[in-house]
Image (tube, rainbow, N blue to C red):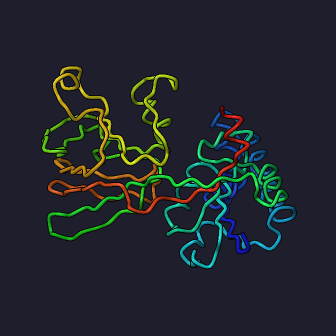
Amino acid sequence: MNQVLIVIKKTKYELDEEIYPDRDFYERITKIQNNSFDKIYQSHLRQLKSREYLQKYVFPKGKYIFREELDTISMDDFDLVVSLGGDNHFTYVAHHLNGTAILGCNSDSMTSKGALLDFTPETLKELVDQNWENHTEEYWSLIQAKITYPDNSIVSTVKCVNEISIRNASPDLTSRYILNHNGVIEEQKSSGLLLYTGAGSTGWYTSCTGLSLQESPVFPKDADYFGVFSRELSLRARANFKLTDFRVDGTLKVISEMNGGISIDSLPERIYPFPPGSIAEFTLSPKNLKVITSKITKKEEL
């Protein structure tokens, strides 16, 4: 791991400073929001300490950038990319990779669990000090999509790490679409479709189905299939339709009958228009995401 790129997410406080340059007005806003200023600012300080810790004790020769600079960097120049932030930051950084290994480091473990993040700055230092002997390499499945629009233009989306949401652009309106999978074609009305990988099988899907973690049909992050769930179907439709909660090991085709959108990994920067007549085809990417994890963390989970 000679060439390491550390990608930093700005703290909420730093982002809020850009939105609210008037400090008095900002404090008035946070007072309305359940007196949240102290919580936001203390998290900001902890995240600053995480950055300083990595720079001083873990990767003093690494290259440190904010994620806004990712498009100016060639990932091929690095052996490892460290995502310093939370889960959403991890998926955002992963969208920019093309084979380079990634490692997730939680910048504030006091307020964020980080389901995709195996390390804190302190445990990452232990790993590096031990010459990486307690690391493992995992290869997570990714979902890729191709959208063909009515004017015959084609867009390929970024590759999904966690989940894809397909729904009406207006949350108050019904999502209408046609599903085509393994010769079964169904026209559905719901609050939207959720596609998810093994990495995402313990997250949004669990919340949608109302199952406990123990009951959820979780599957490995490197599985050769992905899951699909039709959200908030009527009881009658769920009983009669075949394509409501299923797995895809080939291609899923979705035809839009709505003014909709396709959201990748719940990121506002990764929403693709899905107007009526658009056709989206979803498959697993032939190339998986290489993720550095910890043997110690895996033992603790067991």
Q: Who is closer to the viewer here, 91 or 127? A: 127
Q: Residue 225: x percent and y percent?
A: 36, 46
Q: Is residue 19 left or right of residue 276?
A: right
The residue at the point 80 percent across, 61 percent down is 131
The residue at the point 53 percent across, 61 percent down is 94
Q: Indicate the quadrant where residue 286 lies.
A: bottom left
The residue at the point 16 percent across, 69 percent down is 152
Q: Is residue 223 left or right of residue 147?
A: right
Q: Who is closer to the viewer here, 149 or 130? A: 130
The residue at the point 30 percent across, 32 percent down is 245
Q: Is residue 113 left or right of residue 154?
A: right
Compared to 81, does 283 lie above or below?
above
* The N terminus lies in quadrant: bottom right
* The C terminus lies in quadrant: top right
Compared to 104, does 110 lie above or below?
above
Q: Who is closer to the viewer here, 240 or 274? A: 240
Q: Residue 296: x percent and y percent?
A: 73, 43
Q: Residue 75: x percent and y percent?
A: 57, 74
Q: Is residue 264 left or right of residue 258?
A: right
Q: Residue furthest front?
A: 133
Q: Residue 270: x percent and y percent?
A: 42, 59
